[in-house]
Every structure is written in C-alpha cells, then in structure tokens.
Image (spheres, grey):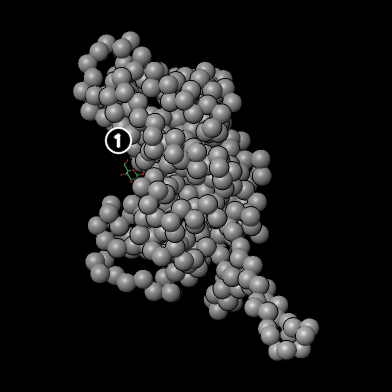
C-alpha cells in the first residue's frame, strides 16, 4: 500500500530541480526548473473529460485544466436534443459552437453526445402529435441537421444513448413507442448519411453490474454488424462505485472488446459514498482506494487491442462539478481533480495504469 502511495506521489509531480551556483561565484542561485506534466501527453490513447460550457467560460482554473490535461472533450449537456433543438424550427448552436471553437484553437478532439436519448427532450418532442411518418421525419431531421452542422468538427457521436433497461429489455422509450424496435438501426443510418466519416457509437451504462444488459447490447451490435448497419463503437459510461470488483470491470471491458468495435469508456467516475452517508468527509485513504480502482480500469482497458482504444473520458473535471452528489443526495468525490482542481491520487493512477 505504502509503495503504491509513494509511486503515485512521485508521478504526480515530476520535478526536475537543477539548481546551480552562478558562474560569477556571487552566490546567486538559479531557481529550480519545474517541469509539470500533462495527462494526455503521458497516455497511449485519448483521454477526455465532459465539460460544462458555463464553467469553461467563467472559471479560468477549469478552462486551463481542460486545456492542459485532456486531448478529447465531450459536451456534458450542450449537444443534447433539448439544448440544440429547443423548438421544432429552432436550433441553438451557441454553446456547442463555443466548444468546437475551443477545441479547434487547442487541438482537442470533440466527441458528440448525444443524438437520440429517451430523456432531456424538449416538450415540443414529448408533446408531438403525428403519424409514424411524421415521427420518422422528426427523428431523421434532428439527427441529420445536427450531424451536418458539426461535420468535420465532431469526429464521433453517441448516436443512441441508454436504450436498454438493466434487465436487458429494450427501453420502452417514446422513440420505440412511436417508431418501433428497429429505430436504433435507422438512427445510425441517418447519422452515417449525414457524415460518412464520423465514428458512430452506441452508449450505455451498467455493463459492469448487469451481465443481462451487456449481453443484450452486444447482441444488438453484432446484429447491426451482420446487417451492415454503420456502427463503429461501443461507449460504456462506467459510473462505478469504489467497491466495484475487478471481475465485473474486466468482464465489461473484455466483452465490449470482443465485438471488434472501438471501445470508449465514455463517462467514467468512481464514487466513494455509494451508500449516501450524509456529512461524510473525504480522507486521503479514500482517495488512495479510489486511485486503485481508476488504475484497474485503465490497466484493463490498456490490455485490449490498441486499434480498439478510442479513449477514456471522465464525466466532468473536478469533484465539485460532478453530477453525482446531486443525483445521490449526498457528498461525493468521484473525479481525478478536487474542488480546487488539484490532482488527487486518481490522477497519477490513471497515468500509472496506462504504462
Ligand atoms: O451530467 C449530466 C447532467 O448535468 C444532466 O442534468 C443530465 C440530464 O441531461 O445528464 C447528465 O449526464 C448524463 C449523460 O448525459 C448520460 N449518462 C448519464 C449521465 C449522468 O446522468
């Protein structure tokens, strides 16, 4: 345990201190040169974060950590249906275009999230009245308008998000109700028509805790491949707990890799307070335990074929930005940076796991 802790500290800050006496012999000392690392430069595959546009624009620490540490970004919310397409004939590109501009200026990859989801829909969609042709047109128009707008700027899309229940049963979403079971395949076809170069992912959570769900997802993707439906990747969210077992993490990653598709760990966070204890306080011991889980995830991912490693994306940047405390109704610290954007033990563990 001690060993792990010290190697984490050692990697966290690679400090080359070269202090030399001045050649004039006057006793002046050159200050040490601090060479600070950047996570993405240490990783063999892309490392990303989902970002909040408001924080990108108004919090300089947040913005500079995103710029420095990651080479891939996902909009946490700005590319969702309700954000981009608030009424039938209105598209609002402002926030998403800000992100694209940031990415272009700073040489970051942008992963699009998400074209079709059962939730975060605007009321004009949930209240929409029309026959199946009108619904099909709504679906196709949204997908193709969005993909066309970002063509050449967004390299990959979560085309459909969270289409299965944990039992492995297809979700009875508004889309399935209106368009039938095979609407998922058509979403991929519509996206592919609009940007044949974009990599298209199916994204979901729970691969690690529900074998039934991951089996259903893999069966759908294998069926798509057999039918020539354009699908290139599988996104596994990985909102996991610190107690999640090695066996479950490995089963999720290796089963996904068995499809031959690209694998994206797309929304990684590791929560410490899964039993939602009120008033719990973060301790360094908790941070070290969390780091070991981060390391295991990265190490297992690193072992799949390099050509399938699309990357690992955490769901936001610092602990204070995470969706987890709000959702859980209790404090938590699920990310590799703390509330002040200082690196936690998980940060070095990610780099360590990829070695
Ligand atoms: O983190 C996101 C949160 O800010 C939003 O309110 C919520 C609803 O749009 O979505 C959260 O992100 C989700 C992601 O889009 C899909 N997988 C689960 C994520 C956490 O709920």
Q: Residue at left 60%, top 53%?
A: 40
Image-quarter location of ligand 1: top left
236 lies above or below 126:
below
> In terms of depth relative to the viewer, which is nearer, 162 or 225?
162
Q: Looking at the picture, does residue 5 appear above or below residue 273?
A: below
Is 155 on the left-hand or right-hand side of 146?
Answer: right
For image coordinates 41% across by 59% down, the residue present is 318
* Residue 6 visible to the viewer: yes
Determine the residue positioned at 33% across, 34% down. Answer: 83
Q: Is residue 222 visible?
A: no
**Location of mark 1 (residue):** 120
Residue at screen point 36% across, 71% down? 282
Expressed as whole percent of the image width and height from the top left, the position of residue 104 reads 55, 39
Residue 87: horizontal and vertical position, in percent?
Answer: 27, 24
Q: Is residue 120 left or right of residue 223?
A: left
In the depicted view, which residue is nearer to us: 170 or 239?
Answer: 239
Quarter-of-image position of residue 133: top left
User: Residue 332 at x, y = what percent?
Assistant: 34, 62
What kind of element bears circle 1?
loop
On-image quarter of the N terminus: bottom right
Taking depth in this image into account, of 45 and 83 the one nearest to the observer is 83
Residue 269 percent location from the top left of the image: 43, 54
Which image quadrant: the C terminus? Answer: bottom right
Residue 1 appears left or right of 18: left
Tell me if 116 is positioned left or right of 108 in this view.
Answer: left
Mark 1 C-beta closer than 8 Å to ligand 1: yes
The residue lying furthest to the right in this view is 23
């Amino acid at each position: 345990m001690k060993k792990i802790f010290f190697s984490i500290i050692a990697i966290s800050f690679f400090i080359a201190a070269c202090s030399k006496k001045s050649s004039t012999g006057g006793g002046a000392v050159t200050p040490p040169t601090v060479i600070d690392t950047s996570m993405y430069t240490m990783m063999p595959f892309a490392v990303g974060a989902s970002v909040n546009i408001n924080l990108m624009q108004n919090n300089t620490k947040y913005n500079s950590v995103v710029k420095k540490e990651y080479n891939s970004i996902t909009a946490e919310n700005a590319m969702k249906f309700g954000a981009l397409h608030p009424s039938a004939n209105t598209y609002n590109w402002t926030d998403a275009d800000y992100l694209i501009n940031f990415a272009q200026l700073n040489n970051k990859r942008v992963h699009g999230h998400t074209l079709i989801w059962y939730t975060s829909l605007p009321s004009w969609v949930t209240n929409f009245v029309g026959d199946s042709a009108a619904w099909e047109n709504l679906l196709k128009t949204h997908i193709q308008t969005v993909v066309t707008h970002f063509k050449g700027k967004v390299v990959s899309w979560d085309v459909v998000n969270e289409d299965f229940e944990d039992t492995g049963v297809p979700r009875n979403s508004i889309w399935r109700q209106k368009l039938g079971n095979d609407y998922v395949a058509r979403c991929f076809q519509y996206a592919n028509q609009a940007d044949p170069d974009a990599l298209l992912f199916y994204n979901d959570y729970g691969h690690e805790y529900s074998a039934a769900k991951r089996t259903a997802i893999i069966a759908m993707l294998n069926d798509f491949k057999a039918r020539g439906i354009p699908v290139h990747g599988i996104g596994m969210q990985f909102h996991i707990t610190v107690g999640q077992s090695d066996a479950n993490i490995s089963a999720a990653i290796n089963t996904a890799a068995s499809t031959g598709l690209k694998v994206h760990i797309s929304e990684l966070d590791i929560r410490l307070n899964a039993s939602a204890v009120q008033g719990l306080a973060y301790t360094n011991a908790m941070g070290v335990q969390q780091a070991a889980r981060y390391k295991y995830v990265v190490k297992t991912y690193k072992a799949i074929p390099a050509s399938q490693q699309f990357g690992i994306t955490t769901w936001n940047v610092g602990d204070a930005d995470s969706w987890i405390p709000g959702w859980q109704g209790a404090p938590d610290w699920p990310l590799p940076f703390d509330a002040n954007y200082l690196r936690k033990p998980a940060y070095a563990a990610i780099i360590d796991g990829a070695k």
